[in-house]
Amino acid sequence: MTARDTYATIKNLRATRFFLSKPLERADLEAILEAGRWTGSSKNVQGWTLVVFEDAAGRERIATAGDFTNPVRNSVATIALVKNPEGNDFDIGRLAQNLMLAAATRGVGSCPVTLHHTDVAREVLGLSDGQSCKYAVAFGYPDPEAEEASRAKRRAAGTTGRKPAEDMIRRDGRAASNT
């Protein structure tokens, strides 16, 4: 992969909410997990555990830990990102992004999901003291027709696209606009 390919993958990464029912190829899932294993972390503590749900019953259990978890239910695999006692939220975010980018390079779609009910996640995952889980990532091969229909609906509602750079990038150490 060239630098241009990497940049294009980053710029074109989109959340996938609708997946085909085809299970992930073992090589694709293992490559995604390996990319997660190699994610950088503060002081190299690697303060996370990845919990993989490939069966529908398991995905349904973890889906009950969030309010907007249909992508988990629609997926063929979901990975819960457990923060261990030595971990931090910033590194969990890095982990999620690496998993998603690795998936994209293999033609696998993904969607980050917030687990709003951490007590439910704790029970489903059997977490020990000091562990927590607020996030998961749903994976599967994208269903192009369902994805396009969903994106068309969001476009019609005006809820797509990116803010202009001038609305989100500040220079010279100032967070607020001087307008």
Image: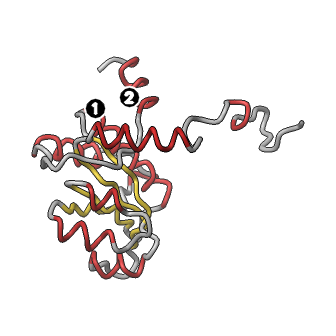
Question: In 3D space, how far apart are the residues under numbered discs 1 and 2 (Cα atoms)?
Answer: 7 Å
Q: Earlier in the sequence, mark 1 or mark 2?
A: 2
Relative image position of residue 138 (x, y in whole percent): 30, 54
Q: What element does badge 2 sit on?
A: helix
Q: Report if the CB atoms under discs 1 and 2 are less than 8 Å apart.
A: yes
Q: Residue furthest left?
A: 26
Quarter of the image for residue 164 reads: top right
Relative image position of residue 81 (x, y in whole percent): 34, 61
Classify mark 2: residues with Cα within 10 Å, few (<14), some (14-19) or many (20+).
Answer: some
Relative image position of residue 152 (x, y in whole percent): 45, 38
- Give the residue displayed 28% in from the left and 62% down from the top: 73
Identity of the amino acid at label 2? Answer: Thr
Up/down of 164 relative to 139, above or below: above
Quadrant that contains the N terminus? top left
Q: Nearer the viewer, residue 162 or 100?
A: 162
Q: Is residue 175 left or right of residue 11?
A: right
Relative image position of residue 7 (x, y in whole percent): 43, 24
Quarter of the image for residue 85 reads: bottom left
The residue beneath circle 2 is 9
Identity of the amino acid at label 1? Answer: Thr
Quadrant that contains the C terminus? top right
Q: Is residue 71 left or right of residue 174?
A: left
Q: What element does badge 1 sit on?
A: helix
Quarter of the image for residue 16 reads: top left
Q: Nearer the viewer, residue 39 or 32?
A: 32
Up/down of 3 relative to 102, above or below: above
The residue beneath circle 1 is 105
- Give the residue displayed 41% in from the left and 39% down from the top: 14
Classify mark 1: residues with Cα within 10 Å, few (<14), some (14-19) or many (20+).
Answer: some
Give residue 150's mark: none
